[in-house]
Each structure stands twice: as structure tokens, then as C-alpha cells.
Image (cartoon, rainbow, N blue to C red):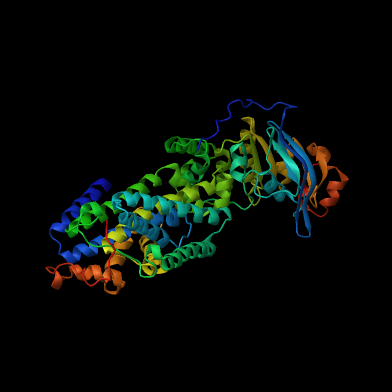
Amino acid sequence: MTAPAPISNRPPTRQAGQALLLDVVGLSKRFGGVQAVKDLDFTVAEGEIVALIGPNGAGKTTAFALISGFLTSDAGRVTFAGRDLRGLAPHQVNALGLARTFQIMRPFPRLTVVRNVMIATLGRHADVAEAERRARAVLDELGLGAKADRPAGGLTLAERKRLELARALGTEPRLLLLDEVMSGLTDAETERIVELVRAINRRGIAILLIEHVMRAVMSLAQRIVVLNYGERIAEGRPESVANDPRVIEAYLGDEEVARAPA
Amino acid sequence: MKWALGLTALAVLLGLPTVLSGYAVTIFVLIFFYAFLAQAWNIVGGYAGQLSAGHAAFVGVGGYTAALLLDRGITPWLGMLVGAALAAVLGSIIGYLGFRFGLRGFYLVLLTVAFAEVCRILASNIDAVGGAVGLYITFTGNPRQFQFQDQRAYYYLALALMLLGTGVVALIERRRFGIYLTAIREDEGACEALGVPTFKYKMLAMVVSAFLTGLGGTFYAFYLFSLQPNTVFGIPLSVEIIIRAVIGGAGTLLGPILGSFILTPLGVPISPPHHQARLAMTAPEKRTAPAPISNRPPTRPAA
């Protein structure tokens, strides 16, 4: 297998008003009687951080699955770095530089932590020693270096979240799709992930995140897309979205919004 | 340390036939041979975690091919490779159907068993390949025809097969291919998300496994002088292969060998008739008797 050449022409820092990286147009998916995603449009620019928020069941994770090739859409188009992703298998989408994490983490429990990340780095580095070197570098960066040789099944929740992040990062993506990498963490752990995500983004990797932890969303995202019942109901800068009456209505009763700094 | 242990074990195994009785040699041949088959299964069943329960099909295809080619004057040393290649083709067909449609667990078991059964029924009903009676190979003792007067030749051949299978697995284990397989066994979806083309690697595992198993088929045919559809394509043979790998440790390098060393001697007293014939030939009280090849059904001329 010939691994695609690593993307070397990444911009060193993010700049405003950059080229489109991800372009989602009219994306729709129905499961039986449930319209999970309906005519969804949004974009992510090169180097940008965008948050996808919405109440439970709004279709956020379905949108991720559609973009990353795990589900086939009923209608609509997803373009990544100028390529139409239609019909591509998840591993092909990943090879183009679009990596995702899973909301329900999926480590390989019987493999060591470093092997887990090597599954990611081997895609671009067929040489096992080189793949391991890179995997250890990613683990060190995410503060998991000390656990590298332990089985992944023994990690704590916070560590597994970071392993999920490490693996996605190990595929050397241009865009990271993060599905609730902060849920269930303590404030200190959340703060740490926020810092990591920021550091990853500073290297020029664009980020699309699903998150319920509003404090993290507000501090990270440059733009927020709000979903409800599979449809986009609002989009914009964090401050404007937080004050949008449609958003407040969708979230009515949600404590996170009540607590969120407007 | 590991190397020293391995080399010592190898030296012992190489020297053993000089002190063993003919009967004991036969048992060792079976141990090595089943360790080899279990090792071949281990690639797709153990490392990749894809439960193939029809590996007998590959033994049968390999054995029948070599035996039929010998009828046409082609030495089994070549026929062995042709048989293995055909087994690999069959493996790729089974793999394609199973993996393209994402069959796992019980469903993959059903598919693989079904293919082995189809092979068995076809072989039983096609007279050109001996029908239900199967194929018998006349013992000539000619090494060109994969036959030997000296039992120890089979011993070293079986040992070589076991070492070959283990060498291949050791190579796979430390390369990207093998590392991917261990992850595919755990979570294919997560593999895909990390850029692993799971279909391709499962296919590769199946094809390599089928090829090696097909090589074993030739040994089977020429060691036991006979190929009967019910035994060589039968479910019991597939099970024999799987249990050795599973008991010894599926997905580990030495598991199939350990499993065969434990289970093969235990199975000797209750082994199937086609093994009993072989064992009887070398049983202590008959050691000096000529090989009882006269009481076999009419033989086909061997080249």
C-alpha cells in the first residue's frame, strides 16, 4: 500500500478568511421515521475551530458519521479539500486527512497504548519503528507517555479520552472531528483538553467539535453551528449564538445554557 | 535467552528421530503437521479474529490438486504449490463474500462451513476426482513422488512445515500487516476511522492462511496415501485445526504449536481411521512388517 504523502504545505498558523476545507451542502439522512439530519449546510475553513452543538438527538453524531464515511447520506454533498467524499470508505476519508474520534470511545483494549496510536501512525509510515517513534511523540504531547506500554483497557476515562485524541492526531489530519471529548471529565481535566485542542489547532489543524460542555465551546470555537431535530437553526460567533432566541428555546431547561457565560 | 531456548528446542527436535521408535516418530509427524495447519489458521482466525471454520476446504483443495497432478505426471513438489495457489484462490472467494458483506462471528462460521461442505459434496459426486471413494495414492517410496521409505523423512518434512508456518507468522507479527490484524480483531470500525483498509487486510490474511493450509493438503495426501471427501473436506478436520490454535492460544506465535503438542498425542487413541492406518504401520508390534498397502481399495496408477 502506498501511503499518501504527508501534507507538508499546512499553514503554520491559522489565518482569518481562509480557503474552505470542509463544505457540507444539503446533507440529509433518515432512519425509518426519524429524519436525523435534514438539509444541513455548513463549512469549516482551513485552520478554523467550529463547534456543532444542539440538544441530545439533534443529529450531531449522525452528521459526523455521514462526513467521515461511516454512514451514507440520502441526499447532499460533502466536499473535503476540494474532493467529493461520496462513496468513500471511512479509511479513505481518513487518508485524505479527515480524522474523527468516537463519542463512545473505542480503544483497542488488549493492545498497549502505544500500539493503539501506532494503528493510526502506520497509515502514513509503513515502517514499524518510525510509526512507533511518531506514536510515542504524540503520546508525550498528550501527556500519556508514561502509560505508553500499558494495555489501553486499564486507562481511566480521562486518559481514554486523550488516547482517542492521540489516535486521531496520529493519522496526521488536516481536520479533526471531535465527538464529545470533554463530556464526563472534571473541570481540571476539561481545562487540560481545551488547552490540548488549542495547541493542536495552533499547528494548523482545523477542528470541528461536538460538545455539550458550553464553557469549552465558548472559549474554543470561532464559530458555532446549532442543530435541532437534524436542522441547522442558528450559526455564528459564540456570543451571538448564545443570545439567539431560537437557540435558547431549543435548549430551554438545559442547565448548561443557563450556566453558560453569555 | 529467547533465541537460546528456541535453538535448543530446535536441536532437540532435529535429533529426536535418532532415538525415537517408529510409532513415536509418527506421533511427532502428526504433532508438527497439525501445528502447521493450526498456525496457518492462526493468521486469519487468531490474529485477525475472523472465525473461519472451513479450513478443511483448503486442505482438500491442496491435496486433491497435488494427487490429480501426479496422475498427469507432475511431481507433487510442484503440485503442492499449484494446490496451495488454488486454495488461495478459494480463500479469496470465501474472503470476498464474507468480508465484502461484513460477515463476522457466527455468520462467517456458517459461510466458511458452507463452502467446505460444498467442496465435500462436489468431490463426492465427481467421478473424475474419485467420487465418494476418493483418491488413493500408490506407495512407491519415490522421493520425487513425495514418498519416502524412511519415516524420518516425513518427520523432517512436517517439522519444516511447522517451522515455515511459524516463521511466516513471526514475520507477519512484527510488520504493519500483523499489527493491523491485531487491531482488526478488536474493533474494525475504529480501525477504519484510523485509516486502516480493513477489507484489504482481512482478505490478505485469508489468502495467506489458505495458501499455507493448501500446502499442508499435499503433505496430508501423500503421508496418508488417501484423500476421502468426508475426511479431507469434513467439518471434523476444520475443528481439529481450530481447537489446537484456540487451546494453545489463538493470536499468539507459539499457541498453535503448544496446542498441537497437548492435543495431538491425546487424540491418537481416538484418532480417525485414516490416521489409525498410518499409526498401525509403525505400531511397535508391527515395526518390522512391510507397509500394509496391499489391503487398500484398487489404486490409481501414480504417474
Q: For this rendering, which residue is in front, A111 or B19? A: B19
- Who's the residue at 27% across and 66% down the image? B299
Residue B123, percent across and down? 42, 65
Is B215 displayed left or right of A220 in the figure? left
Q: In which quarter of the image is the C terminus of chain B?
A: bottom left
Residue A238, quarter of the rendered image: top right
- Who's the residue at 25% across and 54% down the image? B145
Total labels: the figure holds: 0
Q: As displayed, is residue B295 above or below residue B145?
A: below
Q: As displayed, is residue B178 above or below residue B246?
A: above
Q: For this rendering, which residue is in front, B265 or B225? A: B225
Q: For this rendering, which residue is in front, A18 or B255? A: B255
Residue A37, percent across and down? 77, 50
Residue B19, percent across and down? 13, 60
Q: For this rendering, which residue is in front, B23 or A28? A: B23
- Who's the residue at 24% across and 50% down the image? B5
Q: Can residue B38 be seen in this view?
A: no
Q: Can residue B124 be seen in this view?
A: yes
Residue A72, percent across and down? 69, 49
Is B173 displayed left or right of B9 in the figure? right
